[in-house]
Image: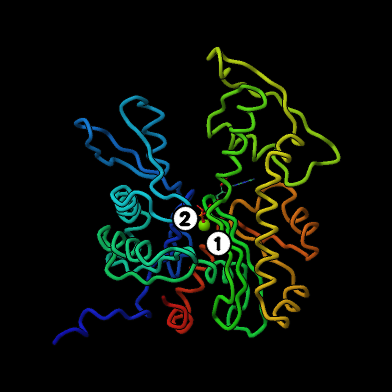
Amino acid sequence: MFSFLSSKDPSEANLYIDLGTAHTLIVTKKEGLILNEPSIIAYTQPKPGQQKPIAAGYEALELVKNSPGNIFIRYPLKEGVVADIQNTEAMIRFFLNKPEVKKHLSSPKIIISIPYDATEVERRGTEQIAKSAGAKHVFLVEEPLVAALGANLDVGSPEGRMIIDFGGGTTEISIIALNDIIFCQSLRAGGHRFNEAIIQGFKTKHNLVLSPGQAEQIKIKYGSAIPRSLIETFDIEGRDLETGKPKTISSSSQELSLTFDHLLTQVSQGIFQAIENAPPEIVGDIMEHGIFLVGGGSLLKNLPQRLSNDVQIQVKISQNPLTAIADGGKALLNNTQLLENILI
Ligand SMILES: Nc1ncnc2c1ncn2[C@@H]1O[C@H](COP(=O)(O)OP(=O)(O)OP(=O)(O)O)[C@@H](O)[C@H]1O
Ligand SMILES: [Mg+2]
């Protein structure tokens, strides 16, 4: 009888969360970005088999650094979706209760974006988790549309645009027009796969064991999507696979590029597949305006040039790839009509 009391009004949405595999960003309508932290939870084990979440984000990293052995960390999201319900809920709750978030709102009505190929169970699961973590209402939207907004594209235009969101756990290659996703090739592989490829490559070629943190550092510092004309060399210390002892080897940016090659080829193939599935006039729009890149993975050196060489279309990287989706979230919070149009 009083069902209207619980109905959701999109104009009341007051927070956007980009719940990413690597980073969680929280945005308000007015202030914009108010939280940007690693998607990590720290927990203790009061009894065998029991987990007690104690902190999230940077605080979690700090705790584990100061108390290794007693405190454990976990990434509760994998490949863009919730992999661990209990810890994702705890992480969102910690973030919503942080003073810098709490001071802006007492009753969060949250927009959350979901990867295009997330299943119905994953979608409803995320909604439920956010509610359990303290959200009054949850509005789900497709992530590629928020990415396009974040790249300053006119998503309502009949002209087609191609946007690639290169995240930590997913890479979504989408064609957008008329507030809709015409095609999306969602690869459940992002920047983390590049780190895995480095770890695997060094194990096989050099018998050297590296940590995920080391792989991330050398990717960022020396990684390149094309072998550079000037080849940079570097030394890296790891653990010998056979003896277990520390060992230092020399490697180069060129070796890293070769390690990444098959992953980059997958992205180029995804672009071709999107183009093959688009109507001819939309393909014309994309050829004319180019391909837009957002997400932290797009910061890999020479990525636009590599993709552009492969597909023969201009590729442009957005100004702040790591926060572009959050910018899209802010735009969405300030455009109720658009939010109504694109709600899942
Ligand atoms: N300078 C850089 N060079 C290469 N990769 C980078 C650089 N900076 C960040 N990255 C990569 O960006 C990824 C994180 O990007 P982002 O924060 O957009 O992901 P996410 O939104 O958390 O993940 P997803 O959207 O897939 O759930 C990581 O894999 C990280 O290694
Ligand atoms: Mg992302």
- Quadrant in which the N terminus appears: bottom left
Q: Secondary structure at mark 2?
A: loop
The quadrant where residue 139 appears: bottom left
247 horizontally vs 10: left or right: right
Q: Nearer the viewer, residue 94 or 259?
A: 259
- Identity, as a three-letter code, of the amino acid under mark 1: Ser
* Badge 2 residue CB within 8 Å of ligand 1: yes
Q: Is 293 above or below relative to 251?
A: below
Between residue 145 and residue 9, name the one nearer to us. 145
Q: How many marks?
A: 2
Q: Which mark is residue 80?
A: 2
Ranked by sequence position, the earlier of labels 2 and 1 is 2
The quarter in which the C terminus is drawn is bottom left
Residue visible at 43% across and 82% down in the picture: 340
Q: Which mark is residue 146?
A: none
Amino acid residing under circle 2: Gly
Dot 2 alpha-carbon crowd within 10 angstroms: few under 14, some 14 to 19, many 20 or more: many
Query: Which residue extends farthest bottom?
Result: 1
In percent of width and height, residue 15 lies at 39, 67
Q: Residue at x 37, y 74 (%)?
A: 13
Which structural element holds mark 1?
strand
Name above or below for residue 270 compared with residue 95.
below
In-image side of 271 versus 244 (left or right): right
Q: Is residue 73 above or below residue 144?
A: above
**Residue that carries the numbered disc 1 in the rendered image:** 186
Tell me residue 3's x, y (percent).
19, 83
**What colouring method underlies this structural image?**
rainbow
Residue 209 in the image, given as x and y percentages of width and height: 56, 24
Tag 2 and tag 1, C-beta contact below 8 Å = no
